[in-house]
Amino acid sequence: MNITFRKSIMTTAMAIATLPVMAQTGSTSSDDITQLRELMKQMQIELKALQKQQVSAVEPVVMAADAAGNESKVKLFGYGEMLYTRPRHLASEAMATARRGVLGFGYAFNDRTRFVAELELENGVVSATDQGEAAFEQLYIEHDIHDRLTAKAGLFLMPIGYINESHEPSRFMGVNRNLVETAIIPSTWRELGLGLQGSTAQGVRWNAGVVTSFDLNKWPTDSAESKESPLGAIHQEGQLAKAASLAYYGALNYDGIPGLNVGGSLYTGGIGQKQSNLASPNARVNLAEIHAKWQVGRWDLAALAAQGRFEGVSAFNASAVAGSNPVPDQFRGWYAQAAYRLWRQGDFSMVPFARYESVNTAVGFSGLPKGLVPANEPNTRVMTLGANFYLHPQVVFKVDAQRFLNNSQQDRVNVGLGFHY
């Protein structure tokens, strides 16, 4: 209650208290009554003003409570990465790009059911004449059946390898994602379908599900794209995906020892999609991978090996559709990586690393006449040395040098900036 309002009350009370005395002495006048009315009128005005002040003081509290309530249900997250790369022997091909910006949002309907979406924008600009891309990386509903079993439905990431599910730039070493988990495992790899994931008290995690598969009709006649990533060349990404032939996946991980993770996964699916116009309507692809990570003291050691195999593609390769780019029988790769936290002070840290990887995206061909079978190319072998400098565990500057051991023309230096929230 403000001082002015208090004075008005006191003045009015004193005036009312003198009325009986004035009445007994006969000294009451019309002027006194008029003055009293004015005082009461002024008090009513000030009372209304005070009530408005009290309401306005309460409203922000109510709004804050609403905002807090909404914040507990709505979650915003995402990541971004930018890079500069300069080939050692081809300075004219130096390039900088805003490689990825991902806007994620989720909503909890209740304690057990939630919605998750991630919208990814690549290379800064998206238009018909640019190389940028806009796509949903994830779009699914997830429900906890009980504390150790969760189901999901929609467009979601395959639980295969390390990078595919955990690819924020602050969570992997080097400016670029490793070759094995881009060329052999086509990160970021998502499918439409149904999935289950569970865990045990002993540290075992498992995943299983049924999802859409790849489309052999997309196999390019130009070998450049398929050599970059055989599965990446024929993925459907939830866009009008052919679904006559589905796929099945399973993954198993063990985290029962602090700092240690070992696991593997399997994926198998039809790629011919039972298309009558395709020479191999029942063609399939199988992919298997194993991985291990050990974080002990300042060391972070990791290794992964993956192998894929196409089946039933002989007729496709013999047809004119394959042209000069037949589908390989196998594609495979592996890497080993060591990182060491050299320095840390508060949120700052410096982590140098070294990685060796070997990849071959086309091993063997079937269905082709002798003399037309392409020769197997040697494995692409890459040595990467670099460091991640963290301004914060979620903000990182990166620099590395890559040496392509069987093709020095691809040697390059990379600089990057990444974050996630």
Image: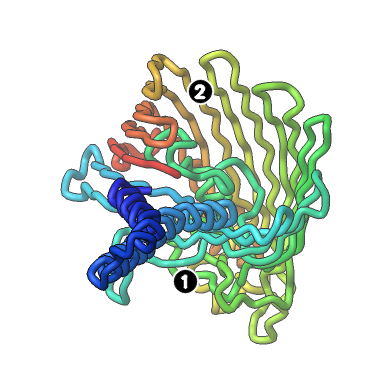
Residue 243 pos. (x, y %): 69, 76
Element class at badge 2: strand
Residue 410 image point, x, y percent:
32, 42
Quadrant in which the C terminus is drawn:
top left
Residue 338's disc number: 2
User: Residue 140 has which mark?
Assistant: none
Indicate left or right for 319 with 119 as reference.
Answer: right
Is 286 positioned to the left or the right of 352 in the image? right
Residue 155 drawn at (x, y percent): 62, 65
Q: Which tag, 2 or 1, sits closer to the chain's start?
A: 1
Q: Amino acid at mark 1?
A: Thr
Label 1, residues with CA under 10 Å away: few <14, some 14-19, many ≥20: some
394 vs 173, nearest the viewer: 394
**Which kind of residue does numbered mark 2 sit on?**
Ala
Q: In this orientation, which residue lies closer to the viewer: 276 or 136?
A: 136
Mark 1 residue element? loop
Label 2 CA crowd tier, 10 Å (few <14, some 14–19, many 20+): some
Q: Residue at x 47, y 62 (%)?
A: 119
Point 66% across, 49% down: residue: 159
Please determine whether, in this image, residue 21 is positioned above or below residue 415. below
Closer to the camera: disc 2 or disc 1? 2
The residue lying toward the viewer, choosing from 7 and 405, is: 7
The tag on residue 221 is: 1
